[in-house]
Image: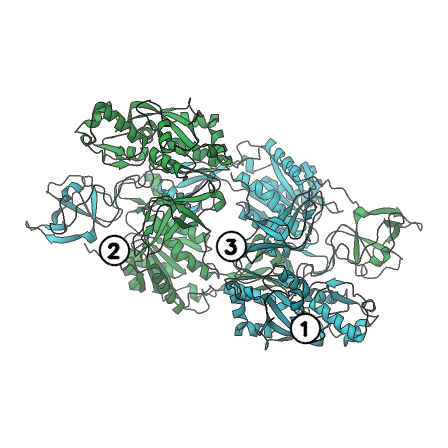
Chain colours: A green, B cyan
């Protein structure tokens, strides 16, 4: 088994510079060739040249109103009390011989050459003239060119209509067509081949039909990359999955290079025994970079293929003026977060350049970091973060940093970039966030930090369906939530902390953690806690005492979780020490994660809610009934932002949806306690 | 000739409420039905329901690294000085019998069920064991689950992946496919028919082939509306042009109603003799609103058609759950600005609603109004404005308010909405601008207000091609430009003001208008002024004295224009009074507008630059050589924003392009005068 263990890992800016230099040397660091497309099909395309008006608009003197054309000088002296009478004529080119001629015109129609003003129909009165002919009476004099759109009012022929490198909006199409253009010269769209490789990959369609085996991975990076390419103006082609075989990959790359401008080869870009990307690039051209010091991302490959039988270049639509046969290729890492960020960092700037645009610059805000952010010196670190606007300032919290966690990008509100010379940033310091969402959307987001409950997902779903505000939540356990609330890092904290002495939930903890705040606790649900065990409860786990059994493996929740507080309280009552519980040290952050540990067989039981057991087809051994509150400051409670959520707690549809989850009691929902 | 003169003109909010009530009553004020589409094709579509994970991701415990799987407890005690040796095994399901088994795994591969940790290949050393078998040496102990992606790390089955009403971004496709979905339920896209009507209309294609006659109008509203519909998530169908005939229009509407959800009928919505829209709506259903008090826009029609033979409803993809045969129709005014704004005001909110979205909310800024804004009480006024960021504050200037001027929308940076109870806003007051451009783009815009010169178009074109900054310009004449500069309403003023006493351009005027400022004048070009006359100069207009001839009609420039200053100076020298000049009172705002007046025969001559004559194939009678400067404060001159423009004045390509315009002298370009 051949195994490579070497990756260079050069700094990001050096990698970008090397790629750019190679593209420049081969004529690829410039816009693609132009093509003429019908104006009606040009929406969203980018002008390759400046566009000058071919025709004036209007191209004749046009009536601006429905009314009558006349000579302004004929109207001199007309007043309310002394109206003037005009004779209706049909004359067009020939000047009428009647003393005060007038001719009907509709909006947009040309003025007869003898006329120079239009009177609105509303300001006229039909009359029969003394000579028996039909006439029109007007009661005010008109200045010349009244209600006339003179030729060229909008555009004069030869004027600049649109500059080059302009992305065409709907109104631009009007200006182009109106100035006499049936077609417009725009940059050819970059054609990008996306080739997924990996013998372990299966398509989503196959999985939906035939299920999936351990070791198989659903191939979706090509969907993400293709959608990115389309969003950035390119034309993506998704290749079928190619197995991890050098020849198969080389054949696919060679084939794609014939009629594409860029190849994204995913993955095999690392240094494992089946990573062929670097070899394929070397066999077909030049390996410029293998390994970039970015996190996530590391095993990025940048290269240039030399392709002889390229078809695109020999068409009349040559990709660039300087015809040549090099094709850039990017080896995209396999981890989904790395793949998507490689798109943003390396592919987007290239597609922008090819279309005469500057790289996309996301909106940025300054936000206060809620947690210390450690970063590996030497790497440019792209940290996904959640952002909330609480009490008028932005706060930001890093989301899980695993490169395999695509939901970290789905849930991210933005990215904090930690440069490679930095070791990170302290909690409480200000950082720049490059936003994925409009900052205004963040101002309409309720940020919940604290204990995890499945009904939070339901709240998020109901709020999304109703529009208006959005719920974003982070799971740090009940105590963590109260700490975040104290620090002004969230709007509300989900909490289910039992006070052993009083048997009352949350109140004592709130008094201890937020002694100076005016706080409101809204009860969301009552719910049951119990053992989550495999179907049929094969180990016959019953009662709190089972925690101390030495023949079964437990999985715990993290410190500060309400569930953990409950466990410790009950163990204490029975005099069981943590050391007596096998697996007490293994911590998971959510009920579902505990259920997943039991379902996958890595633990025999855990403490959690019934809905989590049901979700993963586990059995549930009830142990206790508890109360789950949403804790917030009075200021938040009385704010506009929170109202849609308060409404929801009195909404029958919502209650019905929650009651359908097993082990939930909605009779207490909406109860308010001032603390 | 039947002529209707009555339009109701009800207030905008009442019109919207009436439309909404009628849509609600017929079941149209709700999202359209859902359809399942493959995830790979769902980019940009909107989820119709919440999506819950079908599979966990990963769906097994996966190695997070290329390395070796082992039991963490076997590694206890391994150190740099006391490495531990493991035996390479092939075991999968069956637990190995060897004392310290280890098995190679690549990233993403499942862990053998007997293993619970992975050591990175970089931290191992192949060895030959004492018993002759192949082995691996490790030099540090591992905690359990090291370098393992536990099942469900990304998503746990049953977890919420995405809420309803969510617009799918590239990474969302990954989360959907990764959680076991091959398809996703999204709202059906609204199908919108756009029917252009008007016997005067011709298509851009026909015009490009056969030219255009007076009275003919290039049909482009349907392109603008179709692009708007596509931008807002709909599927537009552009109908061929329908002549102004009641039966033809009725037939087209009835046909379109069979398989569309909305009809945009353009135009014929006014009250002219050929305006059939209201009649057609009445004949096929219910006319809800005819005339809305908005400017521009007035003759908007809102209606509901009752269609029996509707095909869309009888398919399995019924448009909405509550099957019925009403179809909304909007009569869109014919003026292009009115048409585009009708799209934004009436169509966008409906398409948003049909796709579970809230109406689009543009970014807003507060800006200082540079000119008084008069508004007609009773109308909601949508004023197109230019916006600039000068000396750290936003300033805004209304653009031409003609509803026929599509370039007013093309050039607009945003809209100021004047409510119907207001008479407008004073110069210097703060107004809210709804932006068409990103506010950041405005910070990279050079705002030029002052005299018009064709080279400004060339500057705009060159800057656009090079990227970085953008030039926006407004034409108010030289004096107007200096006034704007004094008020801090622009970055630079184009000026060619001759001081009759010294023969020097601009300096005296700058001292008079900006006495307290440190000003820099950059010479852009020298250029020739002269008479613009029809080809062959049929009236034999020669010399300044020709201005006083009573047999020819003059067209003037507006007060404050450098060209007008020049004219007045020369007339003064000859003792000619303005009253002696036929047409002295007719004012145009640009050289090209003067040329257009001469070209169209409404004037016999005007004063302007040679390039304007050439542009419209006029003859040119040279009279004077003048200097055209770009005047700016020293602060602007030294700012980063202006540098790309300064570079341009020393750029050979740019000089060549300017020199190619007739009558321009580039030898003086870039000369700097401190005033």
- Disc with the residue nearer the chain's start (1 vs 3): 3
Between marks 2 and 1 in the image, the one whose residue lies nearer the viewer: 1
Q: Which residue is mark 2?
A: A271
Specify whether B542 is left or right of A8.
right
Q: Which residue is mark 1?
A: B610
Question: Residues at marks 1 and 3, common chain?
Answer: yes
User: What is the chain identity of the residue bearing mark 3?
Assistant: B
Instruction: Report the Cα–Cα distance between label 2 and label 1.
Output: 68 Å
Query: Quadrant where the C terminus of chain B lies?
Result: bottom right
Specify whether A539 is left or right of B583.
left
Q: Is residue B642 visible?
A: yes
Q: Which residue is mark 3?
A: B440
Q: Nearer the viewer, residue B502 or A75?
A: B502
The residue carrying pointer 1 sits among few (fewer than 14), some (14 to 19) or many (20 or more) residues within 10 Å by Cα, namely many
Quadrant location of residue A594? top left
Instruction: Report the Cα–Cα distance between label 3 and label 2.
Output: 42 Å
Residue found 18% across the figure and 32% down from its top: A579
Q: Nearer the viewer, residue A548 or B535?
A: A548
The relative height of residue A125 versus residue B624 in the rendered view (above or below) is above
Instruction: Report the Cα–Cα distance between label 1 and label 3.
Output: 38 Å
Number of numbered tags placed on the structure image: 3
**SS at mark 1?**
helix
**SS at mark 3?**
helix
Residue A129 at x, y percent in the picture = 91, 49
Specify whether A675 is left or right of B361.
left
Between marks 3 and 2 in the image, the one whose residue lies nearer the viewer: 3
Residue A514 at x, y percent in the picture = 38, 33
User: What is the chain identity of the residue bearing mark 1?
Assistant: B
- Evaluate if marks 3 and 2 touch, with contact meaning CB atoms under 8 Å apart: no
Between marks 1 and 3 in the image, the one whose residue lies nearer the viewer: 3
Residue found 53% across the figure and 40% down from its top: B358
């Amino acid at each position: 088994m051949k195994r490579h263990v070497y990756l260079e890992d050069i700094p990001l800016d050096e990698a970008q510079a090397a790629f750019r230099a190679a593209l420049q040397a081969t004529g690829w660091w410039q816009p693609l060739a132009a093509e003429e497309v019908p104006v009606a099909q040009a929406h969203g395309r980018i002008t390759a040249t400046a566009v000058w008006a071919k025709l004036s608009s209007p191209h004749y003197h046009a009536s601006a109103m429905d009314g009558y054309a006349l000579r302004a000088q004929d109207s001199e002296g007309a007043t309310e009390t002394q109206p003037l009478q005009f004779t209706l004529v049909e004359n067009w080119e020939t000047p009428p011989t009647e003393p005060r001629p007038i001719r009907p015109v509709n909006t947009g129609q040309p003025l007869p050459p003898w006329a120079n003003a239009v009177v609105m129909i509303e300001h006229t009165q039909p009359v029969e003239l003394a000579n028996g002919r039909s006439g029109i009476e007007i009661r005010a004099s008109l200045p010349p060119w009244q209600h006339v759109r003179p030729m060229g009012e909008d555009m004069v022929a030869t004027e600049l209509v649109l500059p080059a490198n302009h992305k065409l909006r709907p109104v631009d199409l009007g200006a182009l067509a109106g100035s006499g253009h049936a077609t417009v010269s725009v940059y050819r769209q970059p054609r990008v081949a996306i080739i997924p490789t990996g013998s372990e990959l299966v398509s989503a369609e196959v999985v939906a039909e035939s299920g999936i085996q351990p070791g198989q991975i659903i191939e979706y990076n090509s969907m993400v990359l293709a959608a990115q390419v389309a969003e950035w103006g390119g034309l993506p082609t998704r290749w079928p999955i190619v197995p991890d075989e050098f020849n198969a990959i080389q054949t696919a790359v060679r084939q794609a290079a014939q009629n594409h401008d860029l190849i994204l080869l995913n993955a095999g870009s690392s240094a494992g025994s089946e990573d062929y990307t670097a070899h394929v690039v070397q066999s077909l051209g030049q390996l410029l970079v293998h390994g970039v010091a970015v996190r996530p991302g590391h095993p990025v490959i940048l290269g240039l293929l030399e392709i002889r039988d390229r078809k695109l270049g020999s068409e009349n639509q040559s990709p660039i003026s300087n015809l040549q046969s090099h094709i850039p290729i990017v080896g995209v890492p396999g981890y989904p977060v790395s793949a998507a960020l490689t798109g943003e960092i390396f592919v987007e700037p290239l597609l922008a350049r090819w279309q005469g645009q500057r790289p996309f610059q996301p909106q940025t805000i300054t936000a206060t970091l809620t947690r210390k952010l450690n970063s590996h010196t030497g790497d440019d670190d792209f940290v996904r973060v959640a952002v909330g606007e609480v009490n008028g300032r932005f706060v930001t919290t890093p989301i899980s940093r695993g490169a395999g966690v695509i939901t970290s990008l789905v849930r991210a509100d933005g990215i904090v970039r930690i440069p490679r010379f930095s070791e990170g940033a302290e909690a409480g310091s200000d950082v720049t966030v490059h936003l994925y969402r409009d900052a205004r959307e963040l101002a309409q987001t309720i940020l919940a930090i604290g204990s995890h409950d499945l009904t939070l997902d339901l709240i998020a779903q109901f709020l999304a369906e109703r529009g208006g505000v959005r719920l974003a939540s982070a799971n740090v356990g009940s105590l963590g939530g109260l700490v975040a609330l104290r620090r002004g890092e969230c709007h509300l904290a989900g909490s289910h902390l039992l006070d052993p002495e009083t048997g009352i939930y949350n109140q004592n903890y709130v008094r201890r953690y937020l002694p100076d705040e005016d706080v409101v606790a809204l009860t969301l649900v009552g719910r049951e806690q119990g053992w989550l065990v495999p179907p049929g409860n094969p180990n016959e786990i019953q009662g709190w005492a089972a925690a101390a059994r030495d023949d079964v493996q437990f999985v715990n929740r993290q410190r500060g979780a309400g569930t953990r507080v409950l466990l410790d309280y009950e163990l204490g009552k029975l005099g069981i020490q943590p050391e007596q519980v096998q697996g007490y040290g293994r911590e998971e952050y959510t009920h579902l994660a505990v259920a997943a540990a039991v379902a996958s067989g890595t633990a025999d039981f855990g403490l959690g809610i019934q809905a989590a057991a049901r979700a993963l087809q586990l059995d549930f051994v009830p142990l206790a009934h508890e109360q789950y509150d949403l804790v917030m400051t009075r200021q938040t409670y009385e704010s506009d932002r929170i109202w849609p959520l308060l409404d929801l707690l009195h909404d029958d549809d919502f209650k019905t949806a929650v009651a359908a989850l097993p082990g939930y009691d909605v009779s207490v929902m909406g109860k308010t306690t001032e603390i």
